[in-house]
Image: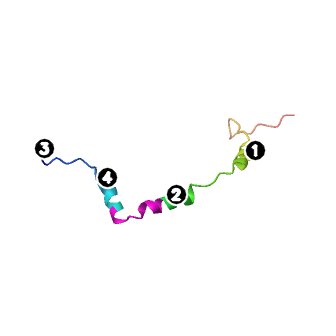
Amino acid sequence: MPLFWKAYTSDVTQFITELKAKKPTLEAEQRAGRALLWDKQIDRSAQADFSDAKVAQSPYVYFSRPPKP
């Protein structure tokens, strides 16, 4: 290895490192935003009811079949 060898870091990695250094609360804010939108408790019984109530879609949705006599 040469005397002045340095490990390569990409521009993106450098940008993220600088951003985290400038704003140390960034990760906490990201986690709070994720919790606000995505980390929710799922009601399993309601999910089961929704899937049971689903109506099968016809193969060709733009043509309604005439009612059978």
Say how many tags the image has: 4
Give whichever of 12, 40 is nearer the camera.
Answer: 40
Quadrant showing the N terminus: top left
- 54 left or right of 1 in image: right
Name the residue type under label 1. Ala
Q: Amino acid at mark 4?
A: Thr
Q: Quadrant of residue 21?
A: bottom left
Q: Position of residue 28 (x, y in %)?
A: 46, 61
Would you name the residue on which mark 3 appears? 2
Q: Which mark, by number, is residue 5?
A: none
**x and y, in percent, of residue 37 in the image:** 56, 58
Residue furthest out toward the right: 69
Residue ID at (31%, 52%): 13
Q: CA distance from mark 1 to mark 3?
A: 69 Å
Which residue has dot 4 on it? 13
Q: Splitting the image into 4 quarters, where does residue 16 fall?
A: bottom left
> From which residue to which does the magenta span run?
21-30
Question: Which label is found at residue 53?
Answer: 1
